[in-house]
Amino acid sequence: MLSRLVLRAAPAALRALPPPPVAVGVLHATRQLHTTQQSLAPLPPLPEKGGEVRHGLIPEEFFQFLYPKTGVTGPYMLGTGLVLYLLSKEIYVINHETVAAACILSVIIYGVKKFGPDVAAFADKLNEEKIAKALAVKNEAIDTLQTAIDEEKKEQWRVEGRTYLFDAKRNNVAMLLEANYRERLMMVYNEVKKRLDYQVAMQTLKRQKEQDHMIQWVEKNVVQSITPQQQKESIAKCILDLKALSKGAHATL
Amino acid sequence: LPAAVLLKDMKLMDVKLGQLPSWVAMRDFTPGGIVGAFRRGYDRYYNKYINVKKGGLGGISMVLAGYVVLSYIWSYSHIKHDRRRKYH
């Protein structure tokens, strides 16, 4: 029935689609996709119960079909009449097979009436287990995907902190540059100081040397200028002075 | 006034009795059509009575009853000899 519906609706749906563009190679963006109402997913759920069947043999639609004209007992009257006709005209022949069929049918009906509900419950339980397993798989898949989504969001949040990381790195680099600059400044200062000290030391040394040299030269010249004659006169003078002094000291005593 | 539906597209229950021969003549009798008809019938029966959550006994019992009736019809010429009366 569903397939017939699809077959009926397919031409109408195909006519409803706009005609494809001339350039068939270029498929994207111009042709509308999925414009029909029918779509295969999600599937509609299975119907709960099958079609009604009365006495296990005759569909309920038959009784509904005859109800307006003959009421409730109509189909049963029809059934009785048919059976009598078949028996009387011996279209249905009563022979050994009838007895066998009667026994088999009675056993079947007894079995169905007695064990029917149990078997039905067992089959339902099997179905429930199948559905529960499928549902568990689905839920598990959903949970894993959800955790994957959360992880991804956290990663995105972490990426936002990248700016801070780069700021810190930039600060580090600036500090390194500053430290290097100051180091070199210090080195320059030290070198210049060394050179200036050298110059100062040179000058003091030169002056000292000049002083020493001059003193030596003056002493040498003075010593040279003291002739022997002068030496004798100075010694005699000293002796006279000493005598005078000794006289004076001797007098005071 | 409902839109006029083509005769061959109408369902069997909507066909009037007088139109029945022409309706039957318009059906698709190619091999593909016959196979399609069997497939449609099978799908209809299957989806109505068997492909449900709580299927009942009626689903297979109707098929078995149909098989019983059909096999009785096929072996009637053989069963005719067990009749009790010759003239009815």
Image (cartoon, coloured by chain):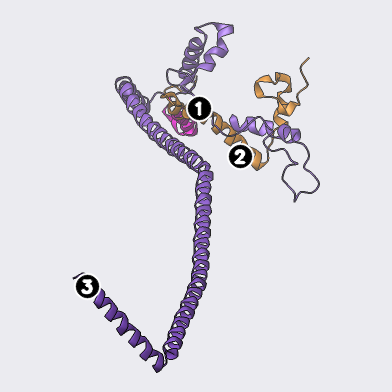
Chain colours: A purple, B orange
Q: Helix or strand or loop: what does disc 3 sit on?
A: helix
The three-letter code of the residue at mark 3 reads Ala
Mark 3 = which residue? Answer: A251
Q: Tell me the quarter of the image containing the C terminus of chain A.
A: bottom left
Q: Name the disc covering residue A45, or none.
A: 1
Please state if A54 lies on the left or on the right of A24 as rendered.
Answer: left
The magenta segment is: B64-83
Q: Which amino acid type is shown beneath numbered disc 2? A: Val
Percent x, y of residue B43: 55, 32
Q: Are marks 2 and 3 on the same chain?
A: no
Q: CA distance from mark 3 to mark 1?
A: 159 Å
From the top left corner, tell me how far across and down residue A168 is, in percent. 50, 48
Foreground mark, 2 or 3, reads: 3
| Residue B7 image point, x, y percent | 74, 26
> In the drawing, does residue B1 fall left or right of residue A245?
right
In the structure shown, which secondary structural element does the residue marked by tag 2 occupy? helix
Name the dominant secondary structure of the magenta segment. helix
Q: Which mark is residue A71?
A: none
Quadrant of residue A104 within the rendered picture: top left
Kindly tell me whether residue B28 is visible in this rendering.
Answer: yes
**Residue type (three-letter) at the residue carrying disc 1:** Pro
Question: Residue under mark 2: which chain is it in?
Answer: B
The residue to which callout 2 is attached is B35
Residue closest to the eye, A149 or B56:
A149
Say if the magenta span includes residue B75: yes
Q: Nearer the viewer, residue A187 or B59?
A: A187
Q: Tell which residue pokes out farthest to the right in this image.
A: A22
